Each structure stands twice: as structure tokens, then as C-alpha cells.
Amino acid sequence: MPDGKTRIDDPSPPTQRVISVLEYLAESDSPRTSAQIADDLGLNRSTAGAILAGLQSRDWVRRRDDLRYELGPGLWAIAHTARPAAGSDPLDAALRALSAEVGCGVALTRMDGAEIEFVALIETHGRIPAGLARGSRLPLMPPAAATIVAHSGPEIRRAWLDRADPAERHLYARLLDDIPQTGGAVWGSGAQGEALDVLAEVVEHLARDRAQAQLRDRVLALLGQISGTAYTAEDLDEPRPLPVSYLSAPVLRPDGSACAELLIGPMRHAATRADRSRYLAALVGTARRIEPLI
């Protein structure tokens, strides 16, 4: 059980129980099951389940595929609002420093069940991708969240690959194997920037209408297809300039799994080998520095 004053030894008002559950998860060094939470806090298990269900409905906690709970992306918006009042926001400062270093926009995403959510955006030379804002959600399918999936278990990897175009599935499988060695993914560019922007705006518009989920998935798949494929380590070592749209790197937990994905979008038609190395080093370095902040 985490140290601190989270245990409830005596009956307490419902609000205190909710706060205690959130404090407990914040102090835990790994996700916890509903039974563990109830037992460690001295709560009735049905009460703990009801609290977790309510928190999950607001995205304040999320239930993992292994049925363990952790803090959810809904708390990011609250933290984003509260941190300026308390002083400087170290996460925001780190993302802005990265944006200044690489000269382009930065995004931070988290995987939430079968979706990914954009939890932070630094917009300089456009959004990542265009048309999306903090809080936007997209379905979890290739190429989205590749670096998170690469550090996930076999069930998540298999489900992610199953949603890829069958003709490209082997390429994504190789990418998942390469990411732990390269530290991230570097994506090429297969279409004009304006076309990418328009499609991304269509995805965001469709995201507001749950009835259009199937059409949104089709448009997002098209967006992924024309935005280019990921380069292999051999490709990146080529001396010639290469087009680069986005780069992504995982933000890792102490156990080696990924809790978030950090992205930059230089959108360069001809990035030299030195530029590619510089982008990847800056991205991976920032991802490591913000690990304690996530």
C-alpha cells in the first residue's frame, strides 16, 4: 500500500471516499484492481466499484485491459488549469522547450481503451495533426500510438495490427519491433500538406458525431495511408535527404510500459540525416525528462 493518508479507518462522507481513491491511485507505483483499492482503503468492495465507475465515466480514472485502474486523462484538463495558478507548469515548459528546439508543433497523447486522446498541444507551425485540439479523441488504429503499442502486451499489439491494412500489416509489425531499439518512429510524407490538413479537419468534425464513427474510422485510415509510412533504421541512415512528416516517441513507466506518446511535426520535404538525428534525439530526450511528470 502507498504511504500517505489515504486509508479510511472510520466512516466518512462520500466526497472524502472519492478523494481518497484518487489520492491512492496518484501515490501508487502501479495500477491497482478494484479489490486492492477497496481492501487497502478499508472500503466496501461494492462502494469502491461504484466510486470507480463514476470516476471512469468522467475519464478521471481509466480501467486497463488487465482490469486494473489508474488515473485517467480527464484529470489532465484539471491539472492544466490548476498548474498556472500554482506557479510554473514543468510539463508545459518541457513541451514548449521542445517546440522551440525543433521549430514545430508538439503533441502529447494517451491511449484510453480503444481510443487515443490528445492531452496537450503546443501549436507553433500548425497542429498535430491539423484540425485537432486538446481533448480530441481518435480510434486506436495504425499508425496512431505506434510507440505506445510497441511497449504494450501481445493482446494490444495484435488488436492494433488487426486494424491495419492487410497489405501493410507486416510493415507495422516490423515497426513495433524496431521502436524499442531506435527509441521512436519517424514518418515519411506521402501527400501534400493541404490534403492532410483537410482530412484531419474532417476527422475532427466527425469525432463530434458518434453516429458517424464508421465513416470517421475510414477517413482516419485514409489519413494514415497518405501521410506516409515509418522509416526503418536503415532508411534513416541514408545520407540523402528524406521527407519527414511526424516523429513519435514513448513516455515510459518504471516497468517499461508506455503511458503516453510524444509527437513533433516538422513537415519537412527534405530533412537531412543530421536533421533527422537531431529531431529524434530532441524528441526522445524530452520524452525521458517528462516521465516523472506524467
Image (cartoon, rainbow, N blue to C red):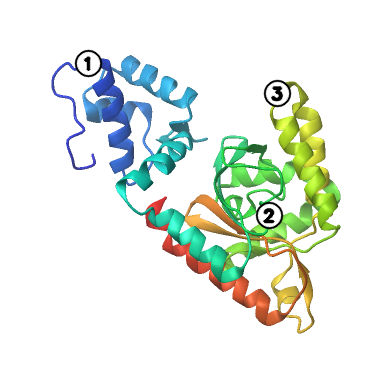
Residue 288: image tag: none
Mark 1 in CB contact with mark 2 (< 8 angstroms): no
Residue positioned 62% across, 58% down in the render:
124
Mark 1 vs mark 2, foreground winner is: 2
* Residue 67 seen by the camera: no
Residue positioned 66% across, 43% down in the render:
132
Q: Is residue 84 above or below residue 186?
A: above
Amino acid bearing label 1:
Pro
Give x and y (percent) for residue 125: 67, 59
Q: CA distance from mark 1 to mark 2?
A: 47 Å
Residue at numbered disc 1: 13
| Relative to 281, 131 lies left or right | right
| Relative to 105, 50 lies left or right | left
How many residues crowd around disc 2 within 10 Å: few (fewer than 14), some, or many (20 or more)?
some
Give x and y (percent) for residue 268: 75, 68
Residue 126: image tag: 2
How many residues crowd around disc 3 within 10 Å: few (fewer than 14), some, or many (20 or more)?
few
On the image, which quarter does residue 116 sit in?
A: top right
Give x and y (percent) for residue 9: 14, 23
